[in-house]
Amino acid sequence: MRRLSPLCLLIFLCIQAYGQDMTTPNGWTYQVLRPGSGAHLSSNKGALTHNQLSDVNGRVLVSTYQIGVPDYQLISELPAGFQSAFAVMQAGGKYRFQIPVSDLREAMRNAPSMSIPGSYAIWEIELQEVLPPLPDGARLVAQAMERGGSEAAYKEFKLLVNGSRAYFGEWEINQVGYMFLEKGLADEAITVFHYNVEQNPYSGNAYDSLAEAYYKSGDRASAKKHYQKSLDLNPQNSNARRMLEELR
């Protein structure tokens, strides 16, 4: 007798609980894993979410759950398929979508390519809050980097965090810090990560990123201090534990 895989069994149970598969306006198949009871989402809003993208074999490609930090999206900036998916969501709800690989590759055309087997990927998402439609601060800094280089990007970051014209949550600030770190600009990255720690003093991930920037700058003492703080806040942080072993 043919047995269902764990993933197929989970999907089957969800369908049994909430009815037949449904379809977004653009044709993506989805299931409601947990109904929402809050505000409905529309294209003129922002969304704060936890989400995870996996391939058909269950391999996680991208996940906000891994670091415990939600992600922000300005809906009007998303490709049409994702706007259509967000249109069926309600705050407090959790959903699973089957995204055709062709649509996913189009949405990620400016990101590093990744191997995705099968004809679709699985996107699980929890809509935590419906927010005002502010632009993503990390995206604005990235655009400044493309136009004018790292100096322009750093200036843009300073302007944005001192104003109110962009959304800058922990995830977005962290992205900006890594933009500078990947360019070899450890001092700028340390400044950004310090700001993130100030805004999110109980985040083990914020301290982990700051520790990494110190480590790459050659300041082992500061790296050790902040990895220890990260581990204190999140005892499950295997990266901080490993780095502390290395720094002994």
Image (cartoon, rainbow, N blue to C red):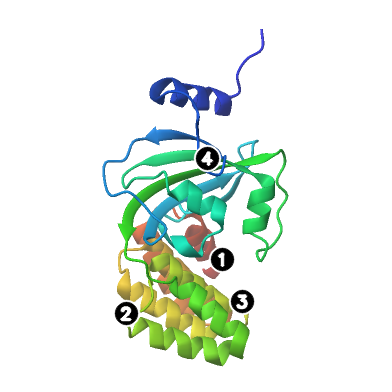
Q: Are marks 1 and 3 in contact (CB under 8 Å)?
A: no
Which residue is label 2 attached to?
164
Q: How many marks?
A: 4
Spatial CA span between label 2 and label 3: 27 Å
Q: What residue is pinned by disc 1?
A: 246
Q: CA distance from mark 1 to mark 3?
A: 22 Å
Task: Nearest to the eye among marks 3 and 4: give it.
Answer: 4
Distance from disc 1 to disc 4, alpha carbons, whole Å, reads 41 Å
Residue type, numbered disc 3: Glu
Q: Disc 2 vs disc 3: Cβ atoms closer than 8 Å?
A: no
Q: SS at mark 1?
A: helix
Q: Which residue position is annotated with label 3? A: 182
> On screen, 242 above or below 56?
below
In the rendered image, residue 48, in percent from the top left (x then y), is placed at 37, 57
Q: Pointer 4: residues within 10 angstroms few (<14), some, or many (20+)?
A: many
Q: Earlier in the sequence, mark 1 or mark 2?
A: 2
Q: Name the image quarter holding the N terminus.
A: top right
**Residue drawn 44% across and 70% down?**
136
Q: CA distance from mark 3 to mark 4?
A: 32 Å
Describe residue 197's horizontal placement relative to residue 99 as left or right: left
Asked whether residue 210 appears in the rendered view, the answer is no
Q: CA distance from mark 1 to mark 2?
A: 41 Å
